[in-house]
Amino acid sequence: MARYLLSRIGQSLFLLLIVSIIGFALLHLTPGGPLSQFALTPGMTAADLHRIAHEMGLDQPLPIQYLVWLWHLLQGDWGRSYRDQEPVLAIIGEHLPATLELMASSTILAVIIGTWVGVLSAMRRYSVADYLATIGAMVALSIPTFWFGLVVIYIFSVSLEWLPSGGIATIGNGSVLDLARHLILPCVVLALVTVATWSRYMRSATLDVAAQDYVRTARAKGLRPGQILRQHILRNAMLPMITLAGLQLPTLLGGALVAETVFTWPGMGRLFLDSLGYRDYPVVMGLLMVSAILTLIGNLAADILYVVFDPRVRLA
Amino acid sequence: MSGVGTSQMEMAAGKPVRQGNRAVRRFLRHRLAIIGLLIILFLVLACAIGPSLLPYNQLHIDLRHRFQAPFMGPHILGSDQLGRDLLARLLMAGRISLTVGFVAMVLSTAVGVIIGLASGFYGGRIGGALMRLVDAVLCFPSIFLLLTLAALTTPSLLTITVIIALTAWMQVARIVDGQVRALRERDYMIAAEALGASDSRLMFRELLPNIVAPIVVSATLNVANAILMEAYVSYLGYGIQPPTPSWGNMLNNAQEYLTTAPWLALLPGAVITLAVSSFNFVGDGLRDALDPHMDLPG
Amino acid sequence: MSALLDVEDLAVRFRSDSGEVTALEGVSFSVAAGETLAIVGESSSGKSVSALAIMRLLPPAPACRVTGRIRFQGRDGPISLLDLPERAMVAVRGGEIAMIFQEPMTSLNPVHMIGRQIAEAVLAHEGGGKTAALRRAIELLDLVGIPDAARRAESYPHQLSGGMRQRAMIAMALASRPKLLIADEPTTALDVTVQAQILDLLRRLQAETGLAIIFITHNLGVVAEIADRTLVMYSGQVVEEAPTASLLAAPLMPYTRGLLNSVPRLEAALRPGQRLPAIAGNVPDPRHRPAACTFQPRCDWAQPDICGVTRPGMERVAEAHLVRCARWREIAV
């Protein structure tokens, strides 16, 4: 098992290397390259630019530049924001918690609802409820997240005036209730896609497991249906779902970006769009790298969890 | 249990029917897919012919009828802040969005097929490297990549389409790679190779025809995805630029009018949802029809 | 002698796209307490479906319809299994009638420890606490001859050998001292030596506990070793029933004869080039069964004017010997 984990970690690091090459390539695609920020400074001459380029090592061959960039990256030097000269890593660190809060809460919500819907669909296969769940999931996957956000704002903020239409908290009011009221709408909006995906996969995983011989054994030894569902069907159907959860992470991050924009949620997604608006490329690149690293960590965590929950892998 | 298994399998097998014929029958039985197909045809026709039948041009500014609610005046589906006809704008936007969706699908499928074929066919190091590239690109949330690329380039119809395609080819590549690896070892491939067929002949004449079904399915789903992606980038301001209307950029500043003119936000989104889910339903129906082992909900 | 289990006119029909398919019809037999009845036949002859019908483990209506009568001498008096509400049936399963399956690997849940899976059965029928149930599970593992039972209880299925797994399945089946054990090809997936051990175990358990066994197999060698009586099934029907000794010595139904001939024998080594006699053709498709004798198309004895016209009923040819063949008298000679 240790070998398996080591090889998985090795694979992740290798992928991270490729990811960093893509990130570096994108950085050099920026109009004017990393020099562009200085080109905008008034009174900058071509000679000055040339000198800066030399100081920054931009006249070196690209592979050398890449290695230097990677070296800085590994040391936590992700560059400075063009906007306020703050270190990129610090800026991202400020915005990460809000995004994680949103992602975690919506994932919990989505997993609870999605599991329930998926199991119900599987247990009542081809029933009206199953068809409605199938159609509902398909439509949910087709709704633009931002538009769904606008719809819930229209219903719950504009028409009913039950919930705030944006922000993470009312200024001057830091109560838990206030935070929760702000969280509800973005959390639900972000959960939509996850619920749809999760319920579909849960349905097919449940159907797969329900057809297994050991479920027949469980029935043959006289367990009650509820027991069979909990101990034998759900427990085993959850295994592939762990992997799915890891694979869904990029989609979830992308959804968070959109939800944060609609609800002016001060997280990574907002930061990303603001930075794009200011052409603040160091921050943009930093966020791209962070999102890819989060994805890799998520996949690795899913693999480790799988090992914990499946004795066949654990003891192999 | 063996007894039940066998007899059920025999039942499922039924009388031998020609594969293609059966796929068409299975697809037609998929009611949602048929409805989806009809909606797509309707949308395409409406966007193609509709604008010339309407009294208003999508750019015509009618200041006397600004913010007219749907069905409450001369503009059937209402008008926006400049008094432009919403229906005319929706139809013209549909031309743009559907075109972007189709063309991006063609491009991403082509890229995916070529990379997948090369990876699956050559296998070994080349295949491994190509698939690691796919894995690496998939680590980035596609919206992040899309927006970065869009922000780096000057927005135009072409660049947006290309960029959407660039962030959507990976799934096709994975599917093709997997299928080709499986087919590679079959007898007829080995025979063709032994007869001295060239690599490109093997790939495009022997392998490709055998994996058309999964490619068609994922291409259909890719149209849905591309329409959705166009909506996202345009809504966020990095896609199709006004005054050219697209379904995404029509929602661009709709949020500010949410209290006064909610239809400006609600209608374009509803049309996007309708179009995207239609493509998704068709893709789903195709998958069931083309894969005889799928669990088929009537 | 009153029967422990009495099956009468059992029929099973599955619904499919192309209409209803009869998997089983007119099946009647009984099992006495402490007896071993073997059911033999090719795959899809209906032997497993019969077992699942008794356990009520077939898919629910309308996908599958089960008709007929199944009477069982339960602890609290006679019960009619097909009329029992599902809640009561849950108590019968594993409690009074237990079942083990062909593939012990897939029949055990891979993510739970063996001991826990047996304890579940104990808890379901005997009640008591988890610790007591686990202790009982270890006793049961010991009973079925698993060495170092306490440690083995903490193994996962994939850590055991095939024979061990089947022993664990048997331990699970014995959890609440059932009166009847249905064993669906329990030795088919095992090596020959392990097969013999499992058969020994079942015989020993039967002697110790007075368990009745329905032993489903396609292996006539196994039948000779374990069964008091044998039922031969073909294409969803019982075609011959007799005490095992007389069935093996003087089979009447041509199908039974065919089965016996296709068993390789040590004493009659084949001459070079000689092939083992096999029954020509295949079991008929359940949707297109011949209206008359279902074995007639493959039968060497078939006479179209008799066998192709009416379907023969079960005829009693001796005290405990029944056969479904129009020409058994000529064959017997």
Image: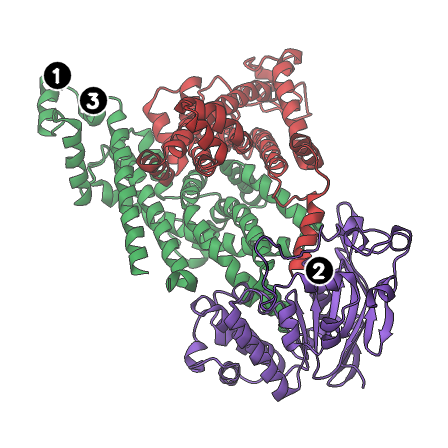
Chain colours: A green, B red, C purple
Q: Could you tell which of marks 1 and 3 lies nearer the N-terminus? A: 3
Contact between marks 2 and 1 (CB within 8 A): the answer is no
**Which of the chains bears the disc numbered 3?**
A
Q: Which residue is mark 2?
A: C59
Q: Which residue is mark 1?
A: A46
Comparing B285 with C165, the one in front is C165
Apparent side of residue B239 relative to residue C203 in the rendered image (left or right): left
Task: Name the amino acid type tagged 3.
Answer: Leu
Task: Name the amino acid type tagged 1.
Answer: Ala
**Which of the chains bears the disc numbered 1?**
A
**Relative height, residue A20 to residue A206 (above, below):** above
Element type at marker 2? loop
Q: Which residue is mark 3?
A: A40
Q: CA distance from mark 2 to mark 1?
A: 81 Å
Q: Nearer the viewer, mark 2 or mark 1?
A: 2
Contact between marks 2 and 3 (CB within 8 A): the answer is no
Label 1 Cα crowd, 10 Å radius (few <14 / some 14-19 / many 20+)? few
Task: Name the amino acid type tagged 2.
Answer: Pro
> Which image quarter: residue A268?
top left
Q: Residue at x 62, y 71 (%)?
A: C222
Q: Residue at x 55, y 36 (%)?
A: A142
